[in-house]
Image (cartoon, rainbow, N blue to C red):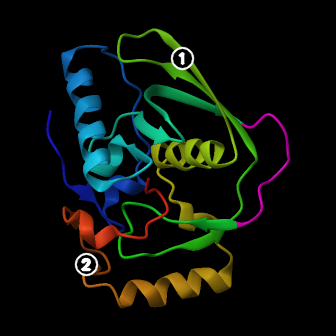
Amino acid sequence: MSIQPVRLYGDPVLRTRAAEVIEFDDALRRLIDDLHDTLDDQRGAGLAAPQIGVGLRVFVYDVEGRRGHMVNPVLELPDSETQDEDLEGCLSLPGGLLYPRKRRMRAVCRGFDMRGEPVEIRGEGFMARALQHEADHLRGRLFVDGLDADRRAELEADLERQDWYTAGRTAVHTDRDDSKGVFFKR
């Protein structure tokens, strides 16, 4: 178990679709432990394997008293009801970069635990937002991909003011105090 550096916006691994987990072995259990340790260190609510540089379909969560992990998740959105637009952020975009984002009100995620046993998570509100956010990471998508043109321009301007950001450069984030104010905080 160990804390891993979080990959930052601009790192190609964040834009690459994660591969399905085939082996439910000790290496997978270590990855899940590392994800939980890193999530705890960053005081986040969710973290996907690509965010620590591992291109596998795995994420962990710690939301509203519910803590766990999901391997090879399939996300379902059971209806079209949406949440009110709310501020969202990401541990891969530190520095308080928060933008209003609509999400579906309810989400169901089906997959497996670290031993290959079937798991289902049902979420509403904040939990549904977190499940959608983490499932997006596994598809190589970030929450900012859903921003409108005006907010996208705001993001670009905000990124230019970040010490950690250099367009086209891979970077990692290890200082948890830098990420205060990020949406996925407990």
- Disc 2 vs disc 1: Cβ atoms closer than 8 Å? no
Q: Secondary structure at mark 1?
A: strand
Q: Determine if the magenta segment contains residue 24.
A: no
Task: Looking at this view, name the residue that lies furthest to the right.
Answer: 80
Say above or below: 174 vs 100: above
The spot of residue 158 in percent (x, y) is 44, 87
Q: Which residue is mark 1?
A: 119
Instruction: Give the extent of the magenta segment.
Output: 77-85
**Residue at the spot x=43%, y=29% of the render?**
68
| Residue type highlighted by circle 1 | Val
**Mark on residue 164?**
2
Q: Is residue 84 magenta?
A: yes
Observer-nearest of 21 and 177? 177
Q: Position of residue 103 (x, y in %)?
A: 70, 55
Please tell me whether mark 2 sits on a helix, a strand or a loop: loop
| Residue 181 in the figure: left or right of residue 143 | left
